Amino acid sequence: MTGTLAPAALTDAPLAIGGRTFRSRLMVGTGKYRTNAEMVAAIEASGAEIVTVAVRRVDLDRTKEAGVLHHLSPDQYFLLANTAGCYTADEAIRYARLAREAGFNDFVKLEVIGDRDTLLPDTEGLLAATRTLAREGFQVLAYTNDDLVTALRLEDAGCAAVMPLASPIGSGLGLLNPFGIRTIKHRLGVPVIVDAGVGTASDACVTMEQGVDGILMNTALAEAREPVAMARAMGLAVEAGRLAYLAGRMPRREIAVPSSPAAGMLE
Amino acid sequence: MTTLAVTINGEARRVPGPATLLELLGHLGLDPRSVVVELNREIVRRPRLAETRVAEGDSIELVHFVGGG
């Protein structure tokens, strides 16, 4: 058997988005950690290469080192700026331009939020902002809902990747609509990265088993009792889920089938 | 040296003038490599900070990256 066990599943292609390739299919946020040291340790433990950051006003009183780059090296991680907190296309476009001016890359995780309670996306604003930013050369990764038609329109609008939610941002409810996510993945040519809602490692694993290209999470790590341990668990779960997807699961049957031979039983 | 009344990050401030945006960042103790500057809603790229003057009544936004998801 030696040397014969090299199925395609074990030689997965790297994740490619907007002309770049990434070794990890797990992306993590940098928000809400109890301390910066814990954030850095958790991100390291997750194995993530892409980390998200937000654009905000500098604190002119400088009472603390609020800038995330005081703690995370841009040489070590690929910084993916978001437009979190934006409620209109114009606002999101403004934030994306500011983020690009920081000089790291032209990727943006585009959020245009439509509702304050659920933080669900304003799909009309999202499409409008995507068209503008794609025209300006941005690699747009659009945070969207689990609706296929919106995802198709986002792809047409020029997204580098679409990011449907597993469940609402920060909810930790896990993958609510596996069918919707699978359908989006089947129909789109651009990478599908599930963003938001994953609560624990099993959620991440089940999400990856749908065949999506990656997962972005933040709160599941930051609000775990032990973020570093959860980050490691998530890294393993994303890998396990990916591998299980590539391996191809057995069919579901509503009947038992014995695993041991029926023949050869004693009289 | 006179002062200029400007709005920085939504706050009314008096800053020393005449000054360029680069000098203003220095006055505020900010490293120009770690902030992005918007002057009256227009981004001012880093190479132009030293040649862009601050004027009375300007509205300036200074942003950077913070933790987020």
Image (cartoon, rainbow, N blue to C red):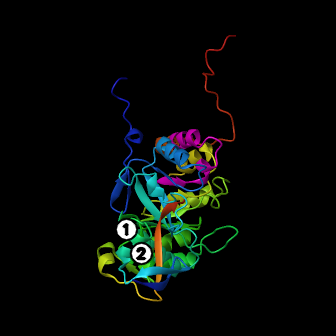
Is-magenta flag for residue A9?
A: no
Answer above or below: position of A164 versus A121. above
Residue, x 54% and y 72% (percent of image)?
A150
State whether discs 1 and 2 lie on one chain.
Answer: yes
User: Disc 1 and disc 2: Cα gap in Å?
Assistant: 9 Å
Residue under numbered circle 2: B37
Label 1 crowd bin: few (<14), some (14–19), many (20+), radius 10 Å? some
| Relative depth, front residue between A170 and A212 | A170
Number of callouts in the render? 2
Camera-nearest residue between A129 and B53? B53
Nearer the observer: mark 1 or 2; the answer is 1
- Residue sitting farthest toward the top: A267
Which kind of residue does numbered mark 1 sit on? Pro
Tell me the number on the disc at residue A181: none
Q: Amino acid at mark 2?
A: Val
Q: Secondary structure at mark 2?
A: strand
- The residue tagged 1 is B32
First reached walking from the N terminus: tag 1 or tag 2:
1
Q: Residue pushed farthest bottom? A: B56
Name the residue rendered at 61%, 43% in the picture. Answer: A202
Q: Quadrant of residue B50?
A: bottom left
Q: Is residue A158 visible?
A: no
Give percent across and percent down for residue A127: 50, 77
Judged by its main secondary structure, the magenta piece is helix
Say whether residue A232 is magenta. yes
Report the magenta residues as a range: A213-237
Instruction: For residue A67, say whether it is visible.
Output: yes
- How packed mark 2 is, by other alpha carbons closer than 10 Å (few <14, some 14-19, many 20 or more), is many
**Rendered-image quadrant of the C terminus of chain A:** top right
Looking at the picture, does residue A202 appear above or below residue A124? Answer: above
Is disc 1 in contact with disc 2, using a CB cutoff of under 8 Å? yes
